């Protein structure tokens, strides 16, 4: 019984060793390169997941690579923009192994791929120096050129990697962070103050120009209104003079009647203010105006009435 168990355990161990020596596994997120005496060919790449056959080392050697995207974050670096401002920039890129065979032949190690990509990423960061600060940082999203810079950087990297034959593919290149140094921040504040002062001065000048235009228009309208009123008044005066001249002609034909009308108007004005007059009896001759014949001569003018104090 004991011998059977020992034989069984030995068989299991032997099977495990044989499996380890003659089989290897490829996971769904991996690709494997199986080399023969450290030489790889087109048939060495295994992309399908599962168990694969191999001969023991040193005949066959298997190297696994990940199919997943790899992230490379570069170190921060201070750069100069086209308008002389300093910015601190941190960039990144995502990459993957597109051709495992070329990658194995040229680089072999993913760490070496990271070093090569990091070197190229630092080289293309010079693209940022071609742009002004307001094209990197701006409240107006249409004025920001970050997407344009990232597209140019990606195209440059793809061209460089295609020439190198590393079997790598860059999926994206981006600017992770832009920080303004203290000196640049001060310059930005000064530029903002200058810009606001210029805008304020322009607004003031525009306001003064509009105010001057409004005053000129108002003065012109005033002159037109006064001229129209003067013409209208002259017309009314002329009409009044014509009508008055007709009345003057009528009054000239009968001067006594004109004097009588003036006196009546004077009485109306005086009696309108609660004034009391004491007239003598002979002053009532004024009523003779209403009883005489048209051809009769005007009655004699009555004496001026004398006012007497009212009895207490």
Image: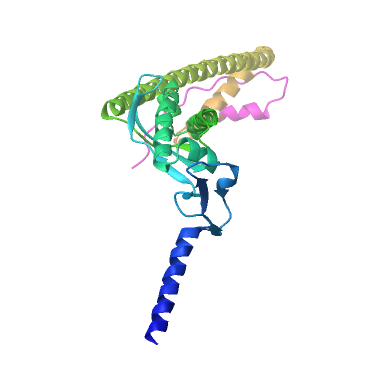
Determine which quarter of the picture holds residue 223.
top right
**Render colour scheme:** rainbow
Q: Quadrant of the N terminus?
A: bottom left
Residue, far left: 182
Relative height, residue 56 to residue 185 (above, below):
below
Give coordinates of residue 51: x percent, y percent.
54, 61
The reply to whether the magenta stretch includes residue 308 is yes
Towards the viewer: 303 or 195: 195
Residue 213 on image: x %, y %: 51, 17
Is the magenta region chiefly helix, strand or loop? loop
- Using the image as rendered, state which of residue 40 and residue 310 is in the foreground: 40
Q: Is residue 295 visible?
A: yes
Q: Nearer the viewer, residue 68 or 214?
A: 68
Q: Indicate left or right for 285 with 196 as reference.
A: right
What residue lies at 28% left-to-right and 26% top-to-bottom?
Answer: 186
Q: Inspect this view and state whether residue 137 appears.
A: no
Left or right: where 186 falls relative to 64 = left
């Amino acid at each position: 019984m004991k011998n059977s168990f020992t034989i069984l355990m030995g068989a299991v161990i032997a099977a495990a060793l044989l499996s380890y020596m003659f089989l290897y596994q490829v996971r769904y997120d991996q690709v494997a390169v199986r080399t023969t005496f450290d030489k790889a060919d087109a048939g060495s790449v295994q992309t399908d997941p599962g168990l694969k056959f191999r001969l023991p080392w040193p005949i066959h050697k298997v190297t696994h690579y990940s199919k997943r995207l790899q992230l490379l974050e570069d170190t921060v670096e201070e750069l100069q923009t086209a308008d002389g401002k300093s910015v601190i920039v941190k960039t990144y890129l995502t990459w993957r192994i597109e051709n495992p065979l070329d990658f194995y032949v040229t680089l072999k190690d993913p760490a070496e791929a990271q070093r090569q990509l990091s070197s190229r990423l630092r080289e293309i960061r010079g693209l940022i120096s071609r742009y002004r600060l307001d094209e990197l940082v701006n409240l107006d999203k249409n004025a920001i050129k970050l997407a344009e810079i990232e597209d140019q950087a990606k195209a440059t990297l793809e061209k460089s990697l295609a020439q190198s034959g590393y079997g790598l593919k860059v999926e994206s290149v981006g600017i992770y962070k832009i920080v303004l140094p203290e000196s640049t921040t001060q310059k930005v504040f000064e530029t903002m103050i200058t810009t606001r002062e210029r805008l304020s001065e322009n607004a003031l000048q525009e306001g003064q120009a509009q105010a001057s235009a409004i005053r000129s228009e108002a003065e012109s309208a005033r002159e037109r209104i006064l001229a129209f009123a003067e013409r209208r008044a002259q017309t009314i005066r002329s009409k009044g003079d014509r009508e008055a001249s007709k009345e003057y002609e009528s009054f000239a034909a009968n001067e006594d009647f004109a004097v009588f009308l003036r006196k009546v108007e004077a009485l109306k004005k005086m009696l309108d203010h609660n004034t009391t007059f004491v007239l003598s009896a002979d002053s009532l001759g004024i009523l003779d105006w209403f009883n005489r014949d048209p051809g009769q001569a005007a009655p004699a003018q009555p004496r001026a009435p004398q006012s007497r104090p009212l009895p207490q």
